[in-house]
Image: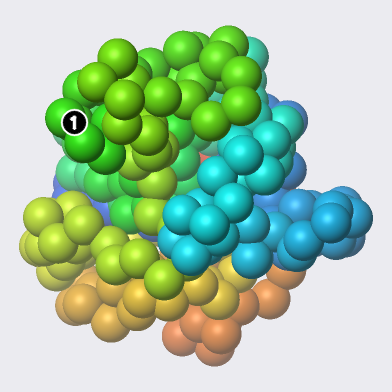
Amino acid sequence: MEKDVEKLQELVNRYDRIVFFGGAGVSTESGIPDFRSVDGLYHQKYEYPPEMILSHTFFMRHPEEFYRFYRDKMLALDAKPNSAHIKLAELEQAGKLTGVVTQNIDGLHQMAGSNHVMELHGSVHRNYCMKCHRFYSAREILESSGVPVCECGGMIKPDVVLYEEGLNQETIQDAVRTIAQAQMIIVGGTSLAVYPAAGLLDYFRGEALVLINKGATPQDKNADLLIQKPIGQVLSQIQAQSF
């Protein structure tokens, strides 16, 4: 075991109130593209840039074009949890991890068995009629065509936070409370470039900040442990319980 992973294991053994804060890099090992890497969504060619397509204004004005992109690039329903998702669920079950704060919308943390998951940007697995609020699954959206419409005639919208939309306040409050009570926070698979999500780290008052990310982040200088490797590769080596 490498020295940095040994150090992470020591910290995991020491603390019982650990929070994980993650981004797109957690799911890339499950085959879901991130946004800002060389082959991420922002570097692919569409008639409109992804930032524009994934905005509230664009959704309301061009819902058919939105759903064409959304079905093609955002609904990876065959993706399975990877070793990072699985290890985090094990840490929660072992009484080590108190919560997962995620910027991802793929639901893979829950699929792996995590219970306390705070989805800052919503989930593709929840879709609601904008008129009567009837629920629709991600599979129903994927298998529909054009703009999905409810039986009542209302347009269906994914419960994901688009550009120009605010985050869910209950989710934010839960994340702030969980982070503020943590002894240790593991930040993984995120460039910490997206706000207000990245600003939640300001509420951490604990003892150990661990950063696991392939690239540099603005918080690197503040980390007690910095590991620049793929998140799944690192977490797969961690024992959920110390013996």
Q: How many marks?
A: 1
- Image quadrant in which the N terminus is located: top right
Of all residues, the one furthest to the front in this rendering is: 153
Looking at the picture, tell me which residue is in the foreground, 4 or 199. 199
How crowded is the residue under tag 1: few (<14 C-alpha within 10 Å), some, or many (20+)?
some
Q: Position of residue 127 (x, y in %)?
A: 34, 30
Name above or below for residue 5 compared with residue 150: below
Judged left or right of residue 232, residue 214 is right
Which amino acid, mark 1?
A: His
Q: Secondary structure at mark 1?
A: loop
Name above or below for residue 105 compared with residue 162: above
Name above or below for residue 234 compared with residue 227: above
Residue at image coords 69%, 35%? 68
Judged left or right of residue 240, residue 213 is right
Any part of residue 54 in sight: no
- Image quadrant in which the C terminus is located: top left
Q: Position of residue 47 (x, y in %)?
A: 84, 56
Q: Position of residue 53 (x, y in %)?
A: 63, 57
Q: Position of residue 94 (x, y in %)?
A: 24, 26
Any part of residue 124 in sight: yes
Looking at the picture, tell me which residue is in the foreground, 62 or 142. 62
Q: Quadrant of residue 201?
A: bottom left
Looking at the picture, tell me which residue is in the foreground, 80 or 214. 80
Residue at image coords 37%, 34%? 155
Residue at image coords 64%, 65%? 51
Residue denoted by label 1: 133
- Please name the colour scheme applied to the rendered image: rainbow
